[in-house]
Amino acid sequence: MRRRLLFDEPLLNVTVHRLCEQLIENHDDFDNSVILGLQPRGIYLAERIHAHLGTLLKKKPKLGYLDATFYRDDFRRRDKPIEPSKTQVEFSIEGANVILIDDVLFTGRTVRAAMDAMIDFGRPEKVELLVLIDRMYSRDIPIEATYVGRRVNTIESQKVLVELKQQGSKEDKIWIIDKEKQK
Amino acid sequence: MMEELKVKHLLGIKELSKEEIELIFRTASHFKDILNRPIKKVPSLRDVTIANVFFENSTRTRLSFELAEKRLSADVINFSSSSSSVKKGETLLDTINNILAMKVDMIVMRHASPGAPHFLAKHIDANIVNAGDGTHEHPTQALLDTFSIHQQLGGVKGKKVAIIGDILHSRVALSNIFALQKLGAEVMVCGPITLLPKHIAKLGVKVELEVKKALQWCDVANVLRIQLERQQIKYFPSLREYSLYYGINKKLLDSLKKEITIMHPGPINRGIELSSDVADSTHSIILDQVERGVAIRMAVLYLLAAKRPELQPELD
C-alpha cells in the first residue's frame, strides 16, 4: 500500500493556528458565532480548533456536534447503513454565525446533509465551512469550503487517512493512501 | 459501517438475535434524542410508503406507529377492518395485495389470528412489521418494554422481571419473555393458575402464584391487563376477586422492603390490576414506555427500510 504524508504534527499545529487566526479575522470575539463539528470524524478537528481559539481569545466559543446520518441522501442506496453518532447542540443557532467543521471535504454530500440537519436547530444568520483537507475536483454537488487547511489533488481510488492523537493515535499524521485494488 | 438487521420482516422477537435487539436499542436512543428536539422530524424515509393495517382495535400502538412513520417523513395510509371491505368477505391476502398494488413499501399489521403476519411474509414482497398477532407475539411492545428497562435501570442483563396477570391471552408476555431472556434477564410469570399457560415453565421462566412473593423477588414488575375480550370462559370468579388477590396497590408496594419499577403496556384497567395511586406514582414508568415506543418503532422501521433492492447498483 503506497502512502504519502500530508501533515505531520508541527505542520498540523501551524495549520490549526492559521485557521484560527482566519476565523478570528471574520468572527472577531465569537460573540454571535458557534462551532459545529460534523460527526463522526470532524469533531476531533472541531475540538482542536475550539481549544486553540480558547487560548487565543481567552474565552471558549460555543461548540456542538452534529450528526447527519438521518439526513443523508444515500440511505437505502448503499450496501450497509451508516452507524449514527450523537448530535449535541445545546444552544440555539437562530441568528448565529455557524462554522461547520469537518476533516476532509470530498463529494460534498455529507456537508449537504449536515446543512439540512443544522437547519432543524434554527435559522442561522450565516454558515461557513472549515475543512482541514479539500480533495479538489471530486465534488458531486456545488459545495466549497470557506477555510481550507490544505488543498490536495487526488483520484477517486485514493483515500485520506487522518490519524489524530485525540482518536487514540500515537502522533498526529495525515496520509493519502492508495486503496488496494479490489478484485 | 454498522451492522444491519438480518431479518427482512419483524414478525416476532423469536426470530431476532441479541445483537439485532441491541442494534435496535442503539438506533432508538438516537431517535429518542431527536424526539426531544424542537423539530422532531428527519427525512430518512421520505421515499417510503407505509400502510398501517389494523384488523383489531388499537389506540396506542396505531398512534405510536403512525407518529413514528411521520417523524421519519414516510407517507402513511391507514386501514382498519371495521370500515373496510373485509366485512364484505375479502381475504387477507387479497386485501394486502390490493394495498400493495398502490405501491406501498411496508406493512404494519395487527391481526386477531396468531401467525397472520408470518403467512403474509411468505406471499408478499413488502417488509412486514407485526403489530400484534392474536395471542402470539407483539414484538415492538416487547422491544419498548426491554428498552425502557435498559434505559431506566442501566441494562437488562441480570435484572429480575416479573410479568404479572393474564399470561395466557397475552402476546405481550410471550414477546417479553423472549426479549428478556435473549438479553440475559431472569423472568418470572405470576398470575392465577387458570391464566398461566400449562407448559410455560418449559420456556425457562419461574412460575409464581402469589403476587406478593413475585413483587418481593423482582426489580421490575410488568403488569398486564386482564383481556376480557379474549376470554370465552370464566377463568376466575369475578373481577373484584381478581383485584383482591392480584391487584397491585400502594399498600402492597409499601409492605415490600425495596423499591421496584412498575410497567404496564396499556390500556390500564384502573382499580383491577393496578390501583390509581400505583399507576400514577413515581414507581411507574408507564408514560415513559409510551414515549420510548415511538423511538423504538422509528428504529425498527428505519432499520427494515435500510435496503431497497431496486435502488442497489447491479453487481456482476
Image (cartoon, coloured by chain):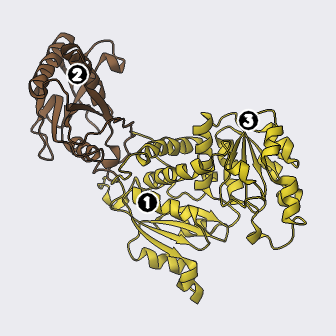
Chain colours: A brown, B yellow
Residue B167 locus on image (x, y percent): 77, 57
* Residue at image location 67% in from the left, 37% down from the top: B184
SS label for mark 1 = helix
* Chain of the residue that carries numbered disc 2 in the rendered image: A
What residue type is disc 1 on? Glu
- For the residues labelled 2 and 1, the Cα–Cα distance comes to 39 Å
Q: Are marks 2 and 1 on the same chain?
A: no
In the image as oriented, which residue stretches furthest toward the top? Answer: A10
SS label for mark 2 = helix
Front of the two marks 3 and 2: 3
**Pick the front one: A151 or A95:** A95
Front of the two marks 3 and 1: 3
**Label of residue A133 in the image:** none
Per the image, the residue denoted by label 1 is: B69
Residue B176 locus on image (x, y percent): 67, 50
* In this picture, residue B108 sits left or right of residue A183: right
Q: Is residue B87 above or below residue B227?
A: below
Q: Is residue A153 visible?
A: no
Q: Is residue B163 visible?
A: yes
**Pick the front one: B86 or B100:** B86
**Label of residue B259 in the image:** 3
- Whether the residues at callouts 3 and 2 have beta carbons within 8 Å, the answer is no
What residue type is disc 3 on? Glu
In the image as oriented, which residue stretches furthest toward the right? Answer: B237
* Residue at image location 58% in from the left, 80% down from the top: B82
Per the image, the residue denoted by label 2 is: A49
Residue A2 locus on image (x, y percent): 21, 23
* Chain of the residue that carries numbered disc 1 in the rendered image: B
**Pick the front one: B181 or A16:** A16
* In this picture, residue A77 sits left or right of residue A10: right
Graded by Cα atoms within 10 Å as few (under 14), some (14 to 19) or many (20 or more), the crowding at tag 3 reads: some
* Residue at image location 31% in from the left, 58% down from the top: B311
